[in-house]
Image (tube, rainbow, N blue to C red):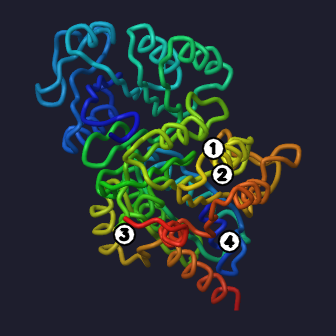
Amino acid sequence: MTTMDLVKNFGGEPANFLDVGGGARHETVCGAMELILADPKVKAILVNIFGGITRGDEVAAGLIEARAQQSREVPMVVRIVGTNAAEAARLLEEAKFETAASLDEAAEKAVAMAKGAAR
Amino acid sequence: MSILVGRETRLVVQGITGREGEFHTRAAIAYGTKVVAGTRPGKGGQTAIDGTVPIFDTVAEAVKQAGANTSVIYIPASGAPDAILEAIDAGIKTIVCITEGIPALDMIPVVEAARRAGARLIGPNCPGVTSPGQAKVGIIPASIHKPGRVGVVSRSGTLTYEAVQAMTDAGLGQSTCVGIGGDPIIGTTFLDVLKLFRDDPETDAIVMIGEIGGSAEEEAAAFAAEHLKGVPMAAFIAGRTAPPGRRMGHAGAIISGGSGTAAEKIAALKAAGVRVAESPTQLPRLLLEAGYRA
């Protein structure tokens, strides 16, 4: 919900909001990406995870799996911190994902991506 | 001192053999929390966590034989209300329920049972409680904490982490961080935790993270205006852009009948003299503006 608030702060407009829930596994994340991509209004994707019970590496694995299967290209920025964040960072770097360290930075990047894609 | 959990905590983990129970018990032990027992009916007499933690069939045995005084619950929603009642019956006075998805109707008699027994229930659907440098009960990542004198209380798990990380990055340590949970029926409210922080000699400032839905933030604001006058306080309210009538991630996060909006909550807090942040990253700066010095 705060992710949405910050997207607005940076001048963007959230197309939708999906909370993967605590403890999401990679298949949950993969399914979530499929749902979001099915919305034609989506011009950019911001993934923000501060894992407590959710493990960052599970989310990263889900994102990588989703990208291999996805039907259309949408720019994406990923911020994963908290539980197993280091493992997540390694997976995302190997797979060449665009990442951000803070939520503010991630929101700013996502808004810029959406504006770039809209042009 | 700190509140709710600390060096005196002797923890029993209900559901220690489950995936989450085991993972987070390891993290708690690594942080220095005294985990004295686990429970799993049918596995009494065995051990968990590489033979280091005895398993009992019941919480009552964990209290009697291992001296447990605090419990944390990692049990699926179908069994969690009974697990809380079992802890209450065993005489545990601090019970932290992490479980998400317990029906609100099931929680009503459980919260009442805790109140009558004089037990403090935190949650459900919460990340738990950490007193940095002393004890970690629940799922808040250990790496984000720094011991200090700011009390943090939040309805949201993730936002607790955001706020605590921002504080630690700014060099502001925490006395205790409490996630009270995002459900409509919870054991401990903002108001309860603010009272505990007020009475804690080791808490000098307070950060509060609220969100849309209900009126707990307004009640907290009224309390702050009256009883926390000299205490530097900063808050963040999530959901300024949330559409009315839609549930936003948490069962309790919903603007219903036009009330429970972020704007109302922000206005109530500001009127009470609490500084309100636009983003969790601003919280440390607002605390300093309110006169707090670490």
The alpha-carbon separation of the residues under discs 2 and 3 comes to: 23 Å
Q: Residues within 10 Å of mark 4 (few under 14, many from 20)?
A: some
Count of marks overlaid on the render? 4
Q: Secondary structure at mark 1?
A: loop
**Disc on the earlier residue, 1 or 2:** 2
Q: Which mark is residue A42?
A: 4
Residue that appears at 52% across and 25% down:
B77
Check disc 4 and report its element: helix, strand or loop.
loop
Instruction: Please name which of the two marks, 1 or 2, marks the residue nearer to the observer.
Output: 2
Q: Is residue B255 left or right of residue B276?
A: right
Report the disc number at residue B250. 1
Q: Which residue is mark 2?
A: B211
What is the distance, in whole Å, between disc 4 and disc 1 at their CAs? Answer: 23 Å
Q: Is residue B214 above or below residue A114?
A: above
Callout 1: residue from which chain? B
> Disc 1 residue type?
His
Q: Secondary structure at mark 3?
A: helix
Q: Residue under circle 3?
A: B169
Quarter location, residue A23: top left
